[in-house]
Image (cartoon, rainbow, N blue to C red):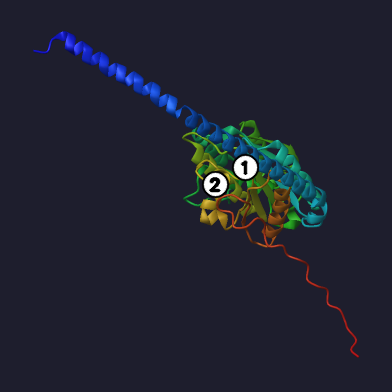
Amino acid sequence: MIDFRYHLVSIVAIFLALAVGIVLGTTLLQDPAIDLAKRTSDELTNTNNGLRADLDILRGREAGNDAFVTAQTPELVSGALVGQRVLLIESPGSSTAVREATQQVIVQAGAEVSGRLTLAEKFLDPAGKGVLDGLVNQLKPANMIFPATATSWDRAASLLAASIMTNDPAQANTPNAATGDVLSAFETGGLLSTDGDPAKRATLAVMFAPEKPYEGESAEVQAEALASVADGFDVTGKGTVLAGAAAPTTVTGDAISSVRDESEISRRVSTVDTADMPAGRVVIVYALREQLTGRAGQYGIGRGASAMLPPVTSASPTPTNQSGS
């Protein structure tokens, strides 16, 4: 019979063999393993340094392009919007810096800024739709009829737009007597604030999308609400551009994507997703000019953009009389 000492000797022998194998293995593989790890580390370091150099070059090119476009902007937009009044609409979370830079370019294009409308978060809150509906029912003129499918934001946008927008140049810079109390009522209700004199109606509007897409369970509804507002102002005036920065393709709370995904609205409202770039501000002016012709487009670099900018139209050559020989 095999006694306990035999088992013990066998077990010790097995562990001794394992120990010897480990020692021999690590000794034999030590140098190749270290060499491989060092080569891999050196390759990764070189690749990382190369990528950093490429990034620095791209940043330098971008800064140079931005500086060039900024210097040329007055000439690029000169006279494009002469005689137009433009309303600026800030949505909750939009960039003040982008709005200020865009306003400067719009003025350089010859337009007058009628004022600014800043929507409060309360305006987009789905839980507050009853407040919107109540105000609209109370304030709308008797002859203002809404489609049966109109949402709370469709109705509110139509009423607000009637107060501060017009597609008749003769009515620009004048208040709408039929909707005189609308702005003050919405302000009192904490739904928006104003700056300048937006009650003196504008012909065009630029709405600024949030810097970051909305998040949470109400994100999609809020984005669609902004699309409704942009559409309402477009229908009442001579055109609206929704401007912002390109968002990731997987985001659902992006207002620009909401407009582009809605075929009916995208046929009327233009979008520009490069408003955070000097070139994008020039494109906003070109998109407004295109709106004056009754056309709309989706411009920029993000999902759903059809081109970087609208087709650039040049003035028709002046006919000249030639005397033949």
Compute the Cα span from label 2 to label 1: 17 Å
| Number of marks | 2
Badge nearest the viewer, 2 or 1: 1
The x, y position of residue 44, in whole percent, is: 57, 36
Q: Nearer the viewer, residue 241 or 191?
A: 241
Kindly identify the amino acid type of the residue bearing the numbered disc 2. Answer: Asp
Q: Nearer the viewer, residue 122 or 189?
A: 122
Circle 1 residues within 10 Å: few <14, some 14–19, many ≥20: many
Circle 2 residues within 10 Å: few <14, some 14–19, many ≥20: many
Residue sitting at x 65%, y 45%: 207
Kindly identify the amino acid type of the residue bearing the numbered disc 1. Answer: Ala
Left or right: 117 as drawn, with respect to 130: right
The x, y position of residue 94, in whole percent, is: 64, 38
SS for tag 1? loop
Residue sitting at x 77%, y 50%: 69
Q: Nearer the viewer, residue 7 or 97?
A: 7
Q: Quadrant of residue 295?
A: bottom right
Residue at the left extreme, as displayed: 1
Residue at the bottom extreme, as displayed: 325
Question: Which circle's residue, 2 or 1, is located before the other in the chain?
Answer: 2
The x, y position of residue 61, in whole percent, is: 73, 47
Q: Quadrant of the image for the C terminus?
A: bottom right
Q: Quadrant of the image for the N terminus?
A: top left
SS for tag 2? helix
From this view, report whether residue 125 is shown above or below residue 250: above
Q: Quadrant of residue 297?
A: bottom right
Residue sitting at x 60%, y 40%: 47
- The residue labelled by disc 1 is 209
- The residue labelled by disc 2 is 154
The x, y position of residue 93, in whole percent, is: 62, 35
